[in-house]
Image: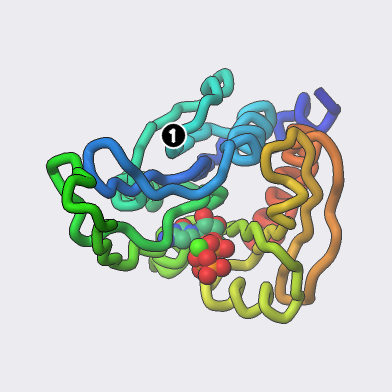
């Protein structure tokens, strides 16, 4: 662990993160979900803990062990993630939304298993899920917020408008096809000045680097 983490630069800070996918039921045996291993979010949670922060991780279903020293709350759906986050948001200094939250859920989810006996596919209706990041960012005395965006192409202009739409000072962007299902990542930082490449490497190393950058900017904002 490098020196800046041994220095416990985040001592006294409360960090709230979301990670992993959410799962939205169609019926008791079927779900709609997003592809997300949770590795980046868990690595950031670990990095924050190493730096001395008090870390709460609201996680969708993943196969990952909870990082040492981190408090994990497990959820399935976006609505569950939303209510868990809103319970902790006002008591946090920094919120980092890494989760791949399902944008919609099935409005007419069935309490019984759907059967194929009638020979045609079901008609699913969708409703929008709450936008957790945008809601936390709009809280009057809420935490300082960082968003993530996994895209299939990195267009600076579109990322800038996504950052503004969310109302967050920093949006961390990566290429979905480059980072999914691997232990490595490449991230770009979008702030009010534009987009800059931040780092490439193992997810834990990049997470430590990103956490250092986040804390630096958070402190500047506080000053
Ligand atoms: N996010 C969230 N709640 C949602 C959707 C997204 O908190 N219901 C958060 C994600 O955790 C991420 C950020 O918002 O930090 C950006 O997510 P993204 O899916 O890229 O943005 P959307 O606004 O949903 O845009 P789109 O999916 O159309 O690209
Ligand atoms: Ca989305």
Q: Is residue 203 left or right of residue 127?
A: right
Residue 114 in view here: no
Q: Is residue 215 left or right of residue 137?
A: right
Question: For the point 52% across and 42% down, which residue is it?
Answer: 19
| Quadrant of the drawing holding the C terminus | bottom right
Residue 5 visible at all:
yes
- Hey, which quadrant is residue 58 in on the image? top left
What color scheme is it?
A: rainbow
Q: Residue 9, image x and y in percent?
A: 71, 36
Secondary structure category for the residue under label 1? loop
Residue 16 sits above or below residue 165 on the image: above
- Foreground residue among 103 and 169: 103
Q: Write the residue at 25% across / 63% down.
A: 123
- Residue 221 occupies quadrant: bottom right
Split into 4 quadrants, where in the image is the N terminus?
Answer: top right
Decide if residue 182 is on the left or right side of residue 72.
Answer: right
Image quadrant of residue 103? Answer: bottom left
Query: What residue is pinned by disc 1?
Result: 61
Q: Position of residue 111 (x, y in %)?
A: 13, 44
Q: Nearer the viewer, residue 220 or 111?
A: 111
């Amino acid at each position: 662990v490098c020196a800046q983490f041994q220095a416990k630069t985040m001592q006294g800070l409360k960090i709230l993160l979301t990670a992993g996918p959410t799962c939205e039921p169609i019926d008791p045996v079927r779900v709609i979900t997003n592809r997300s291993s949770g590795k980046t979010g868990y690595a950031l949670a670990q990095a924050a803990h190493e730096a001395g922060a008090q870390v709460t991780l609201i996680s969708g279903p993943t196969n990952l062990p909870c990082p040492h020293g981190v408090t994990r709350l497990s959820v399935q759906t976006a609505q569950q993630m939303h209510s868990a986050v809103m319970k902790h948001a006002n008591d946090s200094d920094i919120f980092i939304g890494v989760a791949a939250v399902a944008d919609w859920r099935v409005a007419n989810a069935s309490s019984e298993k759907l059967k194929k006996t009638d020979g045609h596919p079901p008609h699913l209706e969708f409703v929008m899920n709450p936008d957790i990041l945008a809601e936390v960012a709009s809280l009057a005395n809420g935490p300082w917020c960082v968003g993530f965006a996994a895209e299939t192409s990195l267009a600076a202009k579109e990322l800038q408008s996504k950052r503004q739409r969310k109302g967050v000072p920093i949006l961390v962007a990566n290429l979905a096809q480059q980072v999914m299902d691997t232990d490595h990542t490449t991230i770009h930082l979008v702030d009010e000045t534009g987009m800059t490449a931040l780092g490439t490497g193992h997810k834990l190393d990049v997470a430590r680097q990103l956490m250092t950058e986040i804390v630096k900017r958070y402190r500047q904002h506080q000053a």
